[in-house]
């Protein structure tokens, strides 16, 4: 059963949103190490602080946010180089913040019924109206901005950057977490939030070894390759959204879309979103090579309209991004495998993030953040 099928069934059965367990305050002082400062790591740290539990976040790179990376210099509005859309209700922001004293204000815009849509089957561009789309775009903002404003301030003093975790030992009375530099941290529990590809590459060793059921889920899950780009043109020659045929359908997604949709701008910015098999054509390309390839594709789809109007481009190859390795777990993954990825090992080793959930939803920022909240509430 795929995620879409599971969610549809859950809706029919009234299981669409499972309530988080009632919060229980820690009965004694304890400490937690969170591995990774992406959406799940930040959300886990934020929830730990709400619970009054001491924690540290160890982040391999020199910044926070992970796949929520943004670009502020290309256009007159922030560009989401990674996670872009809100795939859930706007009430999700309040669920993540979980603080009635904080008024969460995140402007978003949806797509209107009748917005222009097109599908390219490799030969013919078929135009129609956009229908049935519930995803929303941030207005003059991004997922990164949301976390920077509402989550990061509560955890900023607890993040250690350039601290790539290489080993986690839960065999003794305390958990020992070791980084690439050789520094060791002693803690009571650890929450792993790194992208799945890092575990598939065995970037972190575990003592004792992870159970076979866990490693099987890690190795068998499909973590899609990922590539994004934004191009500026003299004018808009493209629909609000254009899907490019990918065969088979469950092998990935390739789309061109109006990135300026709903923004207060006069700029004409086209987004390129490519994951799974479709993304492989762009991986490892130089900026100039990627530009030629994308413009060639756009010219083919839109009758030569792209190249004469082209101004500039910015690209993001997520598969070759250090400490990331790709986009996210495929939409069509088996939900039971996702649940196994999100299961804890014993009482002291926990996993959470877009790939590590309860199997109800995955592959998105909101799923990562809410999964992290649930894990902390269980601890």
Image: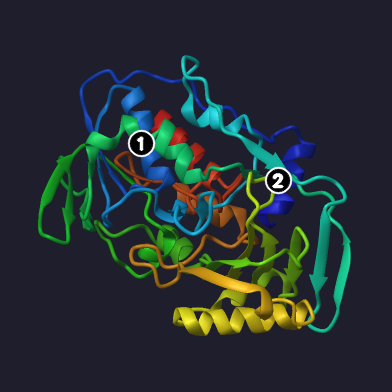
The quadrant in which the C terminus is found is: top left
Of residues 249 and 121, the one nearer the viewer is 121
234 over 15 or under it: above or below: below
Of residues 94 and 178, the one nearer the viewer is 94
Read off the residue under disc 1: 152
Name the outermost residue toward the top.
Answer: 101
From the viewer's perspective, tell me whether residue 282 is left or right of residue 245.
left
Residue 163 falls in image quadrant: bottom left
Mark 2 falls on what kind of element? helix
64 over 88 or under it: above or below: below
The residue at 52%/60% (across/down) is 328
Residue 214 visible in the picture: yes
16 over 111 or under it: above or below: above
x, y percent for residue 165:
23, 56
Of residues 5 and 179, the one nearer the viewer is 179
The residue at 36%/64% (across/down) is 198
From the viewer's perspective, tell me whether residue 244 is left or right of residue 60.
right
The residue at 42%/33% (across/down) is 149
Residue 379 visible in the picture: no
191 over 282 or under it: above or below: above
How far, Cα to Cα, is label 1 from label 2?
30 Å
From the viewer's perspective, tell me whether residue 262 is left or right of residue 19.
right
x, y percent for residue 89:
66, 35
Mark 1 burial class by Cα count in 10 Å: few <14, some 14-19, many 20+: many
x, y percent for residue 107:
61, 34
Read off the residue under disc 2: 7
x, y percent for residue 17:
64, 33
């Amino acid at each position: 059963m795929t995620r879409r099928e599971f969610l549809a069934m859950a809706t029919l059965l009234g299981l669409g949103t499972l309530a988080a367990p009632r919060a229980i305050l820690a009965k004694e002082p304890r400490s937690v190490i969170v591995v990774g400062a992406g959406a799940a790591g930040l959300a886990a740290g934020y929830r730990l602080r709400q619970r009054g539990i001491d924690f540290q976040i160890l982040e391999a790179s020199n910044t926070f946010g992970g796949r929520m990376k943004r670009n502020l210099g290309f256009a007159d509005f922030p560009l989401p180089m990674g996670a872009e859309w809100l795939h859930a209700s706007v009430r999700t922001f309040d669920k993540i913040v979980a603080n009635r004293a904080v008024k969460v204000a995140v402007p978003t815009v949806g797509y209107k019924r009748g917005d222009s849509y097109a599908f390219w089957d490799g030969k013919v561009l078929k135009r129609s109206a956009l229908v049935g789309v519930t995803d929303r775009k941030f207005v003059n903002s991004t997922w990164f901005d949301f976390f920077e404003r509402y989550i990061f301030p509560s955890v900023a003093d607890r993040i250690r950057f350039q601290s790539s975790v290489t080993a986690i030992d839960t065999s003794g009375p305390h958990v020992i977490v070791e980084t690439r530099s050789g520094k060791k941290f002693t803690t009571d529990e650890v929450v792993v939030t790194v992208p799945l590809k890092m575990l598939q590459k065995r970037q972190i060793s575990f003592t004792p070894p992870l159970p076979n059921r866990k490693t099987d889920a890690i190795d068998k899950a499909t973590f899609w390759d990922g590539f994004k780009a934004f191009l500026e043109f003299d004018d808009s020659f493209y629909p609000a959204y254009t899907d490019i045929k990918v065969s088979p359908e469950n092998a990935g997604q390739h789309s061109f879309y109006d990135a300026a949709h709903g923004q207060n701008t006069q700029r004409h910015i086209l987004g390129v979103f490519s994951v799974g098999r479709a993304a492989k054509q762009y991986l490892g390309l130089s900026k100039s090579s990627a530009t030629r390839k994308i413009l060639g594709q756009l010219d083919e789809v839109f009758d030569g309209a792209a190249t004469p109007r082209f101004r500039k481009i910015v690209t993001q190859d997520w598969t070759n991004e250090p400490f990331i390795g790709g986009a996210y777990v495929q939409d069509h993954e088996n939900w039971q495998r996702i649940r196994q990825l999100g299961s804890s090992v014993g009482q002291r080793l926990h996993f959470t993030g877009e790939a590590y959930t309860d199997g109800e939803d995955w592959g998105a920022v909101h799923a990562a953040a809410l999964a992290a909240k649930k894990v902390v509430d269980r601890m």
